[in-house]
Amino acid sequence: MQARRKQAARKQATKRISKQPAKRTVKQAVTKAVTIEKKRVALRINREDYELFIYPHRTLGEVLRDELHLTGTKQSCSEGACGTCTVLLDGAPVRSCLLLAVDVEGKEITTIEGLAENGKLHPIQEAFVEHYAIQCGFCTPGMILTAKAFLDTNPHPTEEEIRNAISGNICRCTGYSKIVEAIKAASERGR
Amino acid sequence: MTERSLIGKSMQRVDAIAKATGQALFTADLSLPRMLCGKVLRSPYPHAKIVRIDTSRAEKLPGVKAVVTGQDSSDEKWGVFRYTQDQRFLPVDKVRYIGEEIAAVAALDEDTAFEALGLIRVEYAELPAVFTMDDALKVDAPIIHEGYKGNVNIHVKIDVGDVEKGFKESFLVREDTFDAPEESYFQAEPYAVVAQFDNAGSLEIWMPNAGPHLKSKPLANVLGVPLNKVRVRKITIGGAFGGRSEISPADVMCALLAKKSGRPVKIVYTREENTIATRQAHGMRAIIKTGVDREGRVQARDITCYMDGGAYSSTGPIATSVPFLCMEQAYRMENVRYHGYRVFTNKPIRGMYRCHGRAFACGVDLQLDLLGEELGIDPVEMRLRNARQPGDYTPTKSQVGSCAMVETIVKSAEAARWKEKWGKLPPYHGIGIGCNSVQTGFPMGIRGGSEAFVKFNEDGGITVISGVVDNGQGNETMLVQIAAEELGLSPQDVQLVSADTEVTPSDPGSYSMVSTFVGGNAVRLAAQDAKNKLFVIAAKALEAKPEELIAKDRKIMVKGEPERSLSLTKAVRMALSRGQSISGEGGYWPKVDSRREWVENPFGQLSEAFSFGTTIVEVKVDPETGRVTVLETWAAQDVGYALNPKIIESQFEGGLAMGGQGGMLTEYHVFDRGRVLNPTQLDYKLPLACDMPKINNIIVESHDPNGPYGAKEAAMSIAMSAAQGYAAAICNAIGVPIKEFPITPEKILKALEEKASRQPSAVSGPED
């Protein structure tokens, strides 16, 4: 079953991009044109394997969203300032707008879509829902993944530690109070 | 009063799970078959004639499917009002700010679209530009729009009572000038549009919006198609905060590209574009003169306000009025004069912002503190003596119904232990208070009302159809909560169809703080209409009168006799078997004075209800670095009735972060000859989790007679009063007023330095 799904996903991903040109000439500021060739990459995302054929200058965020339609990973500032596009790389939070997809081969990538298992919300997701930590919801995936990575390393944090841990994730709606409460509640649930 | 099952309780948000799992789709997440990528070419000049645009090379680039310029767009100009129609999508004659749209391309992918932009040749003839209000108002200043002499876009003039007499009779008069530069919304979601046309020429379009119907009408006008051919679809929206109510050039460009290419097109703005080419808040100078009697009661006020409007009118008349209106609602003032000037400059366009005019609001409140200081009256007492009371009329003739301004002051002062702290805090510690009032809706003519439908399904569940949009504040939850409450259903029984112009009736949108009052009332009435029809059916079966029945726990029962009941499902099926389907309709039009007009006639009932809020802030300032640490805050607002207390709390907290923490400490734009130097989160400092103080929420209820269950606007009075409370607390901590906002460390150090040089005896510190 698992193998079949993998195969199907691989086939789908390869098919999707094979329609695009495999070579691209990019004009650079120095007038000299360079040709960039697509590259084969194997990514492991949310416990599934994908084989893709992509330009090497594509960021992980772009590949997740545009090639694999994992749109739970949002893009906001595209320069590493807002934390919205956070995903986990071998369990550590990274900004998918600053990483090239070709550089994360062999790593285990977790996106928000991979957090709930068998239809059951992760305790942090549950806590965000129950504690009104979500308003517009745009920063939520990045915030939840940052919180997960943090609680994995510090399961019983103080409020100050929580606030520092999520300080790389900007939320414009909540004033953070209810987000901090939710993370605290999730940490206590794990106690 | 019957006991309520859902209203007044913290029901879980209906959209929370979809958002927590990444399933909620925002506009940029949409993907349609054969969809193209759209990109926009923008003006590099602040003010220039467009001599020639040559798109031929771009059109020939393989992969480019459409290029549009001003030639493809209609002559129709956009303006919120008939007299402010001054923005053409796209421009043909000249550009008026750096970043204005010139052309747009749609291509197979982003790289090709970018390459095509580089192939468009635009010949400009540069014109002299103005970047400050002072320069724009000079007699010989370059004119940005023909017909606007001296670049004055809007002049709002209000003169009530006898201001001169009031000053003459005052014991003490002060005049101060307050300044604040522009700030921005920084909605989490950058602006994005997806558009496609079908074979019948109907447009289907998705974008973040604060009112789909406010988008569809101007789109229909610009495209020259009837309204039923413009279908603005519902989509998850990542914040608005007063913005996103108007049509955006991006909407038009995306539609034009989709039409020309015959394919769906998606435009996603970068963060930089979202800051420069959507809207910003107005920069402002407020000259405030206030006279008070010996007891600190305001006798007269004269305010002149200059607002930097940027290149086009946008919501100008409203934006020029609202800062004044908020303060005339919050405080009593019999004799008052207001001159509000909105000035054109060659800078990005300014619109409505959640914290209307920080220079104005903080100025009025800070001046009240300064007057009180001279009179020996403490700030809380100053506010209690001037606070708006229920039953009052505002100077511009709005009757204030429900009003618990005083209660918000008293409760927040008690919670903050104001009396123990005022004047007794250690050096460089300070406490401050701010009060404000916000409208629950504006007069919006034929778009002022909301209509809703409720239809019963044969299993007893319902579908609610409403034009109300949710930008993140929880409007969808509010609608579901009301419908479920009225019909005795659980939230899971309610399917909501909202914010889609093809399906849902007209609605004023969320930007005038009116969704609960108007949209909520409409859904409540629609649910009651359906319920009444069902009660007629059930009454016969239960051998009771319809008026004796209530709906609760998915049952219809005789009041006080729960054993005499009938399941809702059965009642609906009984109705169907008699050839009657059960549905309800409800509409709510707020009772406002339709003759009131922002510029021509700024008198009459403005809103049916007003909210009132007080924020108290305690800070400490490091005199070495000028750094402010906010110790604790108390936010109290009269929300009428708290339909969902936790959602309201979360709005208070967000409002305080935006208006107070961001608005008063770090947020402002820097320009260099019309170019925004800090358009992204890297340089524009938004509050972070580690910055935020403890927020104590105090919900005050005045039970508005006309709001649904007594509810009215909830939380914007916090966003505004927080700014005032922050400013007051910092000035209290350092012992000198700062009249330029936000209050950055440099300004604090400069103020302390000036204070020390003025008082040579006090050089050893304020402890002396």
Image (spheres, rainbow, N blue to C red):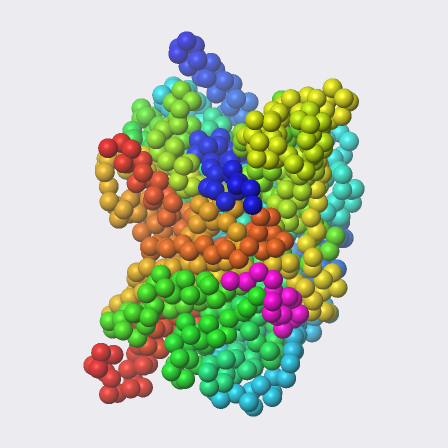
Residue B463 location, x and y as percent?
Answer: 64, 31
Q: Main secondary structure of the magenta part?
A: loop
Front residue (pair B685, B45):
B685
- Tell me what residue is drawn at x 44 percent, y 81 percent: B371
Q: What's drawn in magenta, residue-wise?
A: B391-404
Q: Is residue A62 left or right of residue B426?
A: right
Residue B477 location, x and y as percent?
Answer: 53, 39
Residue B389 occupies quadrant: bottom right
Does residue A81 appear anywhere in the picture? no
Residue A84 occupies quadrant: top left
Front residue (pair B704, B201):
B704
Looking at the image, the residue that sits furthest to the bottom is: B168
Q: Is residue B410 left or right of residue B393?
A: left
Residue B76 location, x and y as percent?
Answer: 75, 53
| Count of marks placed on residues | 0
Locate the N terminus of chain B by quadrant: top right
Answer above or below: position of B167 versus B48.
below
Does residue B426 appear anywhere in the picture? yes
Q: Is residue B396 magenta-colored?
A: yes
Locate the C terminus of chain B by quadrant: bottom left
Residue B601 location, x and y as percent?
Answer: 72, 69
Front residue (pair B210, B505):
B505
Q: Is residue B4 left or right of residue B661?
A: right
Q: Is residue B660 left or right of residue B706?
A: left
- Tell me what residue is drawn at x 78 percent, y 45 percent: B224
- Tell me what residue is drawn at x 44 percent, y 76 percent: B382
Q: Is residue A181 magenta-colored?
A: no
